[in-house]
Amino acid sequence: MIVLSIETSCDDTAISIIKAKSSKKLDYANFEVLSDLTASQIEIHRPYGGVFPAVAKREHQKTLVPLLIKSLKKANLLKESKTIDNKKISKIKKNLEKNEELFLQLKEFLTKYQIKDINKIAVTIGPGLEPCLYTGINLAKSLSYYYNIPLVGVNHLEGHILSSFLSPHEDLELPAIALIVSGGNTQLIYFEKIGKYRIIGETKDDAAGECFDKTARILGLNYPGGPEISKKAKECKSNIYNITLPRPMINDKNYDFSFSGLKTAVLYHSKKNKITDDYIKEMSLEIESSIVDVLVDKTLRAIDEYKAKSLLLGGGVSANQKLIKEFKKKTKVKLFIPNKKYTGDNASMIGLVSIYSPNIKKIIKPISNLKINE
């Protein structure tokens, strides 16, 4: 089975092609990533200090088809077409009437190329930014319709849960706890088996990654904030300001999170002090420590309470070196950490879910009112 997967839930345009040798057991030896390409929009959104949805949608429309061509060529699954179905192209045009730029590029692709040997198309259907999601969905539906390839929708967060398996790994022991930490989500998940999950805690306001971004902006650092905060934290050699920030909800017995108060504490503290380079470094160290302390403490308690045998990390913040170091030092169960290239949004994790998760049962009609999974 060969799967073409598309991911456009936020500001990364991603396309992947995976060849599964076996779809029975999720194991690194049972599949091969033929192509994994991502076009980042970070430089475009940096002036805004965060993702601007309308701009992200526009960039997806410009980037998707060129990335598709590059991905298919890399996997050697593209050949020139000798036939053109104008009736289908007309229907696709009607379906993409609000996505003219995407349609024009797609029309040229459909009249020029034939896709070889793709057995399934998988696309992220949420959660994410609605304008961005629909751009990827519309491309997936159009390709499915024109080439008569089955189409399935995939939950973005299940992709992050399974992203560790895109690299060589130990055997997973169940039950497990999964910690998903990104710009849009912070969740603790009880992982009974592949496809069967239960959220046991999540953020009540800002996600951890969002808190990094917003506090970085307060300090005058670039977007995305997580790497910038971490960089400054590592440079901290002083304790002039003696900064102490709250660890929100760390003592609460539940597994929920709240990071908006931490952001507010940083804002008020910064207004009372001159923002020098030393101040930025000290504050960055304390911001990172506060977020990591809360994430680690709650996750370790969940592992104990649910008698988990494995811990899986996923999402962009799972690349944070302080977070990884703390888990390696403190957890006694098997630890699954994605390869850095798979911590952020990527299409390979979407393809992986479409092959191995029992949640993927329904084949979507390509020209239908496909709803986003909020």
Image (spheres, rainbow, N blue to C red):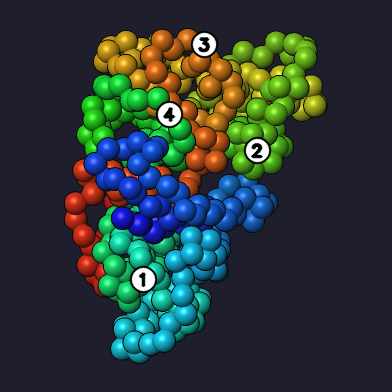
Earlier residue among tags 2 and 1 = 1
Q: Is residue 197 left or right of residue 323?
A: left
- Report the residue marked by disc 4: 169
The three-letter amino acid code for the residue at tag 1 is Leu
Of marks 4 and 3, the one in the foreground: 4
Q: The N terminus is located in which quarter?
A: bottom left
Amino acid at dot 3 = Lys
> Residue visible at 26% across and 64% down?
150
Q: Specify the amino acid type for callout 4.
A: His
Tags 1 and 4 in contact by the CB under 8 Å rule? no
Distance between the alpha carbons at the discs numbered 2 and 1: 40 Å
Q: On the image, numbered disc 1 is attached to which residue?
A: 143
- Identify residue for label 3: 329
- Label ID, residue 353: none
Question: What secondary structure is found at the residue carrying circle 1?
Answer: helix
Pointer 1 with pointer 3, Cβ within 8 A? no
Q: Is residue 8 above or below residue 251?
A: below
User: What's the residue at 52%, 66% (across, down)?
Assistant: 73
The residue at 22%/45% (across/down) is 359
- The answer to whether one can see residue 290 in this image is no
Q: Mark 2 or mark 1, which is nearer to you? A: 1
> Which is more N-terminal, label 3 or label 4?
4
Pointer 3 or 2: first along the chain = 2
* Residue in front for this viewpoint, 144 or 129: 144
Label for residue 217? Answer: 2
